[in-house]
Structures are given as structure tokens and as C-alpha cells.
Image: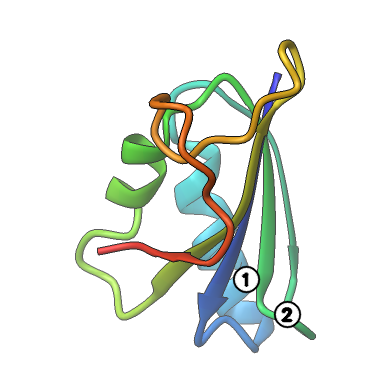
Amino acid sequence: MRQLNLFVDGMSRRRCVREVTARLRDVAGVETVTADPSDCMVRLSGSMRLADVVAAFTGTTYRPELKFATDNASGDTDDDDSGRTAVGKSLP
């Protein structure tokens, strides 16, 4: 199972948290979504692809930044299935 931690700038109110989590729940492969407005962090788990997660923010003012990604099946960290480390990566 893959885990992604995203910093989502601008997600500091309950309304924003509801909007962001609703969008992410609809992403193929997402099993769980938790959001913490105090630090603007969203944690996802499942078999989702990073590109699909980023696409969920299209048309919004939110700009996600990938802080951490891991694939628990292998213990590797990556950002796009290429094996590169993802910590601190800004997303388009």
C-alpha cells in the first residue's frame, strides 16, 4: 500500500478540508484520506497514482506539495513510480 503526505497551502478552514478531502476520496485507488487543517497536511493511503492525486486539484486554488511518499510493499520512497525520492517536491 502506498502512502502520500501532502502539504496543501490554503487548507486552513473546515470548509477547505471538506473540499480537499472530497476531491481526493474520488481519486482511483485512494483508500483513506485524513486532513489536518492545523498544519495543512493531507495523508493518503491506497494504490493511487501521484498524477491522479495532482489532477484532483485542477481548477482549484490549492497547490499541493508532496512531502513524503512510500510504497509499504517494498519499503521504497518515490514520487512517480520512478524510484526518485519525493520529499519536498513541489507539484504543478
Residue 60 falls left or right of residue 13 = left
Asked whether 34 or 85 is in front, the reply is 85
Q: Is residue 37 above or below residue 5?
A: below
Disc 2 secondary structure class: loop
Q: Position of residue 31 (x, y in %)?
A: 67, 27
Task: Give the number of the disc on residue 37.
Answer: 2
**Residue sitting at x 71%, y 18%:** 1
Q: Mark 2 or mark 1: which is in front?
A: 2
Badge 1 element? helix
Q: Residue furthest top?
A: 73
Residue at the (53%, 44%) spot, across then down? 85
Q: Residues within 10 Å of mark 2 (few under 14, many from 20)?
A: some
Q: Residue 51 in the image: state x and y as whole percent.
A: 32, 38
Please tell me which residue is depicted at 25% across the width and 64% down the height of the picture. 92
User: Real-space Cα distance between discs 2 and 1?
Assistant: 7 Å
Residue furthest left in the image: 59
Q: Are marks 2 and 1 in contact (CB under 8 Å)?
A: yes
Quarter of image, res 6:
bottom right
- Can you identify the residue that label 1 sits on? 17
Q: Could you tell me residue 9's position as x and y percent?
A: 50, 83
Q: Label 1 crowding class (10 Å Cα cut-off): few <14, some 14-19, many 20+?
A: many
Image quadrant in which you'd find residue 3 = top right
Q: Which residue occupies the foreground of this view, 71 or 38?
A: 71
Tell me which amino acid carries mark 2: Pro
What amino acid is labelled 1 in the image?
Val
Where is 67 relative to 63, above or below? above
Tell me the quarter of the picture where residue 38 sits: bottom right
